[in-house]
Image: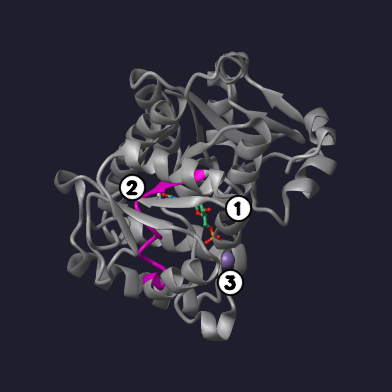
Amino acid sequence: MTPDTARAYVDVLPSVASALAAGRPVVALESTIVTHGMPYPQNSVMAADVEKIIADEGAVPATIAVIGGRIKIGLSDGERESLAMTSGAMKLSRADLAFAVAQGRTGGTTVAATMICAHMAGIKVFATGGIGGVHKGAEDTFDISADLDELARTPVIVVSAGAKAILDIEKTLEVLETRGVPVVALAADLMPAFWSRESRFRAPLRLEKPEDIARLFETRRRLGLDGGLLVANPVPESDEIPAEEMAGYIEAAHRAAQEQNIAGKAVTPFLLAKILELTDGASLKTNIALVENNARIAARIAKALAG
Ligand code: PSU
Ligand code: MN
């Protein structure tokens, strides 16, 4: 639970505050995808488009970030645009959130940190691209995203296109199961693989509609089961890059990362940027499409929760 002392560090955008006070639907958005996941200016265009999609669905968007040490729940157009242009932003997860606040720093919030901040503000639904998870070779590197632990502890619905396909999806599913996180594919039997509609792995759970997701979340809450819920929403068919085609690019990107000794927080941004280069921009187009698709579904879930 968020203590009252957190309030002093949080600024809620007026449109978001009034929606929350009135019990109207709000959807949180992360900002590491803006600061570290996509190049400028596509990141900025994506961030604005996604907010518009949520508003068009009848919900209120709240992009979350830390700016000059303030936890921002909702950004003005100017704040969002300047965050997209900043090159020195930190990548903030649970481990660094308080550091950025205490030091007056600026950073994009990952899935983990965005869940924490959304929960502080009372926002229950959050849309992203793909969550972090267990990296390939984690048995040697121990590189497992803090997103998975956050899903286990913080009661927020995360709408994603699954785990990013640069990860070990099978091991990611195993960790989520161990940590008690429901993973629900939306109208699909298989887990999506971010840029591709299908991975080789069965999704643990399947539901058909946003209303079903809302009911599952409510039921968990009423049963006193802590933690979040991961929705895996496949990218639209017209925008996908099939898994067979992505496999070669993903492998090449991993080889490059190894050759250049990329480690820790830098791994995911490096791989995404490398794959963008290898696919000549096609991966970015798909990434934007899947985020937009997730935003739409998240807005519908938020409406179902509010209604
Ligand atoms: N989804 C995207 N692009 C991204 C991310 C998600 O389409 O860049 C970010 C999220 O913020 C996620 C982070 O939390 O990547 C995972 O980083 P890591 O693997 O270092 O935990
Ligand atoms: Mn990591």
Secondary structure of the residue carrying numbered label 3? loop
Please tell me in which quadrant of the rendered image residue 22 appears.
top right
Q: What residue appears at the point 65 percent right and 44 percent down from the top-left corner?
A: 116
Residue type at numbered disc 3: Ala
Location of residue 185 with respect to 215 vertically, above or below: below
Front residue of 137/197: it is 197
Mark yes or no: residue 24 visible.
Answer: yes
Foreground residue among 21 and 275: 21
Find out whether residue 205 is within the magenta segment.
Answer: no
Residue 287 shows which numbered tag? 2
* Marking on residue 263: 3
Range covered by the magenta-colored residues: 157-169
Q: Which mark is residue 226?
A: 1
Give me the C-alpha separation between circle 2 and circle 3.
23 Å
Residue 85: % across, % down: 55, 34
Q: Within 8 Å: ligand 1 and the Cβ of disc 2? A: yes
Who comes first in sequence, dot 1 or dot 3? 1
Residue visible at 38% across and 35% down? 295
Q: Residue furthest front?
A: 223
Q: Which residue sits at x=33%, y=41%?
A: 212
* Residues at marks 1 and 3, CA–CA distance in whole angstroms: 32 Å
Q: Residue flagged by tag 1: what amino acid is it?
A: Asp
Q: Amino acid at mark 2?
A: Asn
Q: Mark 1 or 2 closer to N-term?
A: 1
Spatial distance from mark 1 to mark 2, Cα to Cα? 30 Å
Instruction: Tell me the quarter of the image containing the C terminus.
Output: top left
The location of residue 13, given as percent across then percent down, is 62, 19
